[in-house]
Image: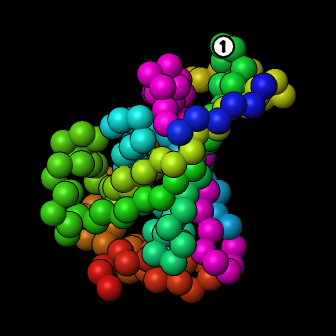
Amino acid sequence: MAEQYPELSDELSKFILEQKVFFVATAAPDGRINLSPKGKDSLRVLGPNEILWMNLTGSGNETAAHLSEANRITMMWCAFEGPPQILRVYGSAKVFHPRDARWAEFSAQIPSTLGTRQYFLVTIDLVHTSCGYAVPFMDYVKDRPVLTKWAENKGEEGIAEYWKEKNQLSLDGKPTGIFGS
């Protein structure tokens, strides 16, 4: 049932790109663990050991804060249709903000939108698959338009203000680096 690999195969990369939702987990050495669902067209497999993920503005900014203290990340995909499968990748990640030199490079691969907060370049050191036999079948209908509409209503200045109010510190009071060190 469960298998471990040092990298993503072409088949597993294809599986990732077919999923409509994935989950990201991080934790600082102390404090709360963060586990968040992600969606939209926000992820690219760059190679067998590398994933690029575009992070959109949200209520918190836990992942960035955690990675600055404990550079470890887990991403997970579940098959909600077709054959059952769960895929987890474990590794580390670098955070890139609009002020960083590689922003344009990443934005060319996953076009940034109003509200794009960061790109995370994930380096994979372990790939783990498991059966997923208990994961239910679920039908994908469409992406929710709510976050896009929220960002459009806020505009660039409103989003920057939101980042100042809500995204500078994690739930545990750890700095996220959204505006630099």
Look at the image and tell me in which quarter the C terminus lies. Answer: bottom left
Residue 31 inside the magenta-drawn segment: yes
Above or below for 8 versus 155: above
The location of residue 165, given as percent across then percent down, is 44, 81
Look at the image and tell me in which quarter the N terminus lies. Answer: top right
Which residue is depicted at the point 33% across and 37% down?
46
* Left or right of residue 141, residue 105 in this image: left
Which residue is depicted at the point 67% across and 80% down?
30
The location of residue 151, given as percent across then percent down, is 36, 56
* Left or right of residue 93, residue 24 in this image: right
Which residue is depicted at the point 72% across and 20% down?
84
Residue 24 appears in view: no
The local crowd at label 1, few if under 14, some if 14 to 19, many if 20 or more residues have their Cα within 10 Å, is few
Give 90 or 112, whichever is nearer the viewer. Answer: 90
Task: Inspect the image, locate mark 1, and give the three-letter code of the amino acid beneath it.
Answer: Gly
Name the residue that disc number 1 marks: 82
The location of residue 14, given as percent across then percent down, is 46, 22
Above or below for 163 versus 4: below
Which residue is depicted at the point 39% across and 43% down?
50
- Furthest toward the front, the residue is 6
Magenta stretch, residue numbers:
7-32
- Under circle 1, the secondary element is loop
